[in-house]
Image: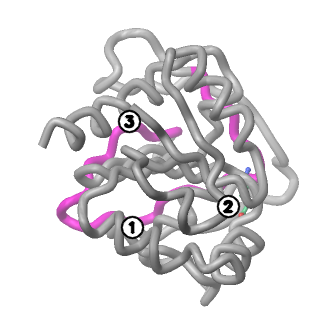
Amino acid sequence: MLIGVLALQGAFREHQEMLASLGVESRQVRKPEQLEGIDGLIIPGGESTTMGKLLQDYHLFEPIRQMALQGMPVFGTCAGLILLAREISGSSQPRLGLMDITVVRNAFGRQVESFEADLSVPVLGGEPLRAVFIRAPYIVSTGPEVEVLARYGDKIVLARQGRFIGCAFHPELTDDTRLHHLFLEQCGLKKAD
Ligand code: GLN
């Protein structure tokens, strides 16, 4: 299995380290040809407006959208979640729009730059998931095909729509690999098709 990690900006190295710890090969994606042969793509945290612009400048926007629509699993974390969303509240910035969700950026307030919390994620089993939120968005509404996998209080912070998973936090900054594992299961299923 080979997983692409979008490496235009943001926390891509940490995702690669986590994949390596799971024994999975990864490739930094900065050019369209680097998408060839990957079984899934991770879009890391960073700055969604910058990443959206770079996706266009590097001619990655349409190839990623097309591959995703044709079956490639995609995992977006934090800014990556924003790029997966169909609607971004109050913003017309570029986005892939692959998930039927509306997100609000920097939604926990400017005064809360970052915090950590233990989330209950039934799909990952009994142990809580430690989540690191950094200028995080959250999901304010979901379409009928979207499964809500975790909330922080009443706010949706982890969701799945078929082969697309998005989370508002940074799972690559802890040593809990369960969410990456969940994504890799999707990628393996795709490969087995
Ligand atoms: N606040 C950033 C944005 O709106 C996301 C922050 C992050 O990815 N840690 O793009």
Residue matched to label 3: 183
The residue closer to the viewer here, 140 or 59, is: 59
Q: Is 47 placed left or right of 64 in the picture?
A: right
Magenta span main SS: strand
Q: Is residue 151 magenta?
A: yes
Residue matched to label 2: 30
For this orientation, the residue located farthest to the top is 127
Q: Could you say whether the residue bearing mark 1 is in a helix, strand or loop?
A: strand
Q: Position of residue 132 (x, y in %)?
A: 69, 33
Q: Is residue 134 magenta?
A: yes
Q: Residue at x 54, y 64 (%)?
A: 33
Residue matched to label 1: 101
Q: Residue at x 65, y 47 (%)?
A: 28
Q: Could you say whether the residue bearing mark 3 is in a helix, strand or loop?
A: helix
- Disc 1 versus disc 3: nearer the observer: 3
The residue closer to the viewer here, 170 or 57, is: 57
Which amino acid, mark 3? Phe
Cα–Cα gap, marks 2 and 3:
21 Å
- Disc 2 versus disc 1: nearer the observer: 2
Mark 3, Cα crowd under 10 Å, few <14 / some 14-19 / many 20+, is many
Q: Quadrant of the C terminus?
A: top left
* Residue 79 location, quadrant: bottom right
Which amino acid, mark 2? Arg
91 in relation to 71, above or below: below
2 in relation to 148, above or below: above
Q: Quadrant of the N terminus?
A: top left
Mark 1, Cα crowd under 10 Å, few <14 / some 14-19 / many 20+, is many
Boundaries of the magenta span = 130-152
